[in-house]
Amino acid sequence: QVQLVESGGGLVQAGGSLRLSCAASGNFISINAMGWYRQAPGKQRELVAIISSGGSKNAADSVKGRFTISRDNAKNTVYLQMNSLKPEDTAVYYCNANVEVDFGDGTNWALISWGQGTQVTVSS
């Protein structure tokens, strides 16, 4: 079983900053890509940023130049530094990880795991 636990959400004024963290724990072999999604009320969940195990990264156009994704492989943790926040960034932010697990019969499988979500609210 794999758990992703997010932290760092909260209420901030427009122009402010927040840093989200997501720590993975449980029984797995390795973690491949990790990412952050967000879902605003009445909208579909959207991919915000993604980072590979080697450090390659990408981000949605709406957050480029403001949000930075990073990870600490030794801590199995991914971060999202959010600067210059705007009211339209208000959403529940979800951590996502592609995790390789041992099925127990000698085969390895890649599973997608999700965190429980953390609320980010940006006031104008």
Image (spheres, grey):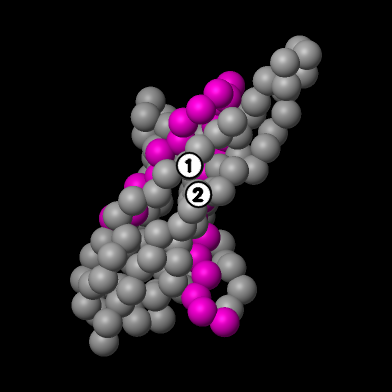
Q: Is residue 62 left or right of residue 83?
A: right
Reply above or below: 10 against 4. Answer: below
Which amino acid is tagged 1? Answer: Leu
Q: Is residue 8 left or right of residue 33?
A: left
Residue 70 placed where, x, y %?
38, 45
Magenta stretch contains residue 25: yes
Reply above or below: 19 against 1. Answer: below
Q: Residue at x 51, y 27 (%)?
A: 26
Reply above or below: 116 against 74. Answer: below
Query: In the current view of this chain or complex, which residue is farthest to the top?
Result: 106
Label for residue 4?
Answer: 1
Q: Is residue 66 left or right of residue 24?
A: left
Q: Main secondary structure of the magenta part?
A: strand
Q: Are marks 2 and 1 in contact (CB under 8 Å)?
A: yes
Which amino acid is tagged 2? Answer: Gly
Q: Quadrant of residue 110 in the image?
A: top right
Q: Is there any visible trace of residue 54 in the rendered image? A: no
Q: Is there any visible trace of residue 12 in the rendered image? A: yes
Q: Residue at x 46, y 35 (%)?
A: 24
Q: Which residue is mark 2?
A: 115
Q: Residue at x 37, y 29 (%)?
A: 75
Q: Name the residue nearer the viewer: 107 or 60.
A: 107
Residue extent of the magenta highlight: 19-42
Residue 123 placed where, x, y %?
27, 82
Element under label 1?
strand
